[in-house]
Image: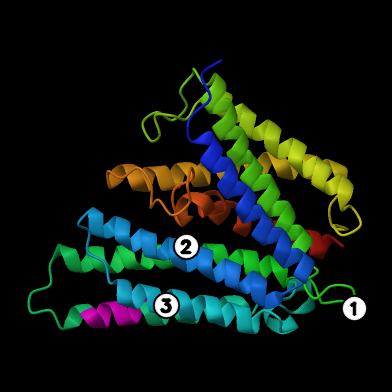
């Protein structure tokens, strides 16, 4: 076994604080609290993304991108509680995607218009448009699926946000996968996995991620089975493993981005973890997948 990494304690403390904030929002049953958490994580990570581009000397239009990210998130928070926009497809919901598409299309047009005024357009014009649009889709749009899960089910007298338990299931399955990968990879990792993207990723960490995601998901499901009527034990087993694999892909995606820009972390905001983008990178991939799985389960039910 390898020595305990020095980043373990600060990472543990950061994790405890973050989970305390999430649990506090659940106990408070606060829509505004959840929305604030989602907005802070997404917009903070988008800021870090544009900073990474600046470090890599890559053209970007951060004013346009950040404005689009704010509009996208605020629009989702305002519109999702309306059943026709944020509800199940089977109940005529899902029109929120029309709003998302409008924001992205208008943003794309604005980016092109910005380039029209340049006296001599060149390769940087295309790069500025492409990388700005990538940031909007990659961070605030993908992360908005957390909000879409929160408002997917109709409100009831017992809960303002009945989707919160599904969102918590997603976060637990995803983030405990990250924990398993870090702990088992740090302590037992010998066989490299995707070394061309992340030299510290190992197969020991990969299987540790699967095991931690499976165990944490089963514990959560056993405690809140009644609040998760769309899920069954067999489905939880399958989902936890699938979400863990997708979470690893999300983590590798951000590692690829950082490696191509020659940076280690998106920032040092969170001790032991890095920045906001280092925190949510795996959720950016798992949240959309889980949302569409829930829509499919609603269709079957």
Q: Residue 254 placed where, x, y %?
A: 43, 48
Q: Which mark is residue 214?
A: none
Residue at (47, 56) in percent of width and height: 276
Q: Earlier in the sequence, mark 2 or mark 3?
A: 3
Residue 127 in which image quadrant: bottom left
Q: Give above or below for 17 relative to 39.
A: above
Q: Earlier in the sequence, mark 1 or mark 2?
A: 2
| Tag 2 and tag 3, C-beta contact below 8 Å | no
Q: CA distance from mark 3 to mark 1?
A: 35 Å
Residue at (55, 63) in percent of width and height: 143
Residue 230 in which image quadrant: bottom right
Q: Residue 58 placed where, x, y %?
A: 22, 59
Q: CA distance from mark 2 to mark 3?
A: 11 Å
Q: Residue furthest left?
A: 119
Query: 10 Å neighbourhood of mark 1: few (<14), some, or many (≥20)?
Result: few
Q: Residue 2 placed where, x, y %?
A: 52, 18
Q: Mark 2: which secondary structure?
A: helix
Q: CA distance from mark 1 to mark 2?
A: 33 Å
Point out the stretch of residues depicted in magenta. Answer: 108-114
Residue at (92, 57) in percent of width and height: 226
Which marked residue is nearer to the observer: mark 1 or mark 2?
A: 1
Q: Mark 1: which secondary structure?
A: loop
Q: Which residue is mark 2?
A: 139
Q: Which mark is residue 68?
A: 3
Q: Give above or below for 113 relative to 172.
A: below
Q: Give above or below for 41 relative to 181.
A: below
Q: Which mark is residue 157?
A: 1
What is the chief secondary structure element of the magenta stretch? helix
Residue at (66, 33) in percent of width and height: 210
Please tell me which residue lies in front, 40 or 12. Answer: 12
């Amino acid at each position: 076994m390898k020595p305990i990494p020095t980043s373990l304690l600060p990472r543990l403390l950061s994790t405890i604080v973050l989970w305390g904030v999430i649990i506090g929002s659940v106990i408070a049953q606060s829509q505004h609290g959840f929305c604030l958490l989602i907005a802070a994580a997404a917009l903070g990570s988008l800021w870090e993304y544009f900073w990474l581009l600046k470090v890599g000397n890559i053209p970007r239009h951060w004013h346009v991108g950040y404005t689009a990210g704010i509009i996208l998130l605020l629009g989702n928070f305002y519109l999702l509680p309306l059943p026709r926009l944020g509800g199940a497809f089977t109940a005529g919901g899902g029109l929120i995607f029309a709003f998302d598409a409008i924001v992205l299309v208008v943003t794309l047009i604005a980016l092109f218009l910005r380039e029209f005024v340049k006296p001599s357009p060149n390769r940087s014009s295309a790069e500025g448009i492409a990388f700005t649009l990538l940031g909007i889709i990659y961070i605030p749009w993908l992360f908005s699926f957390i909000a879409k899960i929160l408002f997917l089910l109709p409100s009831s007298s017992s809960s303002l946000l009945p989707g919160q338990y599904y969102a918590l299931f997603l976060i637990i399955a995803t983030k405990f996968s990250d924990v398993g990968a870090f702990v088992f990879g740090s302590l037992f990792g010998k066989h490299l996995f995707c070394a061309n993207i992340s030299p510290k990723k190992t197969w020991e960490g990969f299987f540790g991620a699967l095991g931690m995601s499976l165990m944490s998901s089963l514990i959560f499901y056993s405690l809140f089975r009644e609040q998760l009527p769309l899920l069954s034990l067999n489905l939880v087993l399958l989902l936890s493993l699938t979400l863990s694999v997708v979470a690893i892909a999300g983590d590798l995606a951000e590692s690829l981005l950082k490696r191509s820009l020659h940076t280690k972390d998106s920032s040092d905001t969170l001790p032991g973890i890095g920045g906001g983008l280092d925190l949510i990178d795996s959720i950016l991939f798992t949240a959309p997948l889980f949302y569409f799985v829930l829509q499919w389960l609603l269709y079957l039910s």
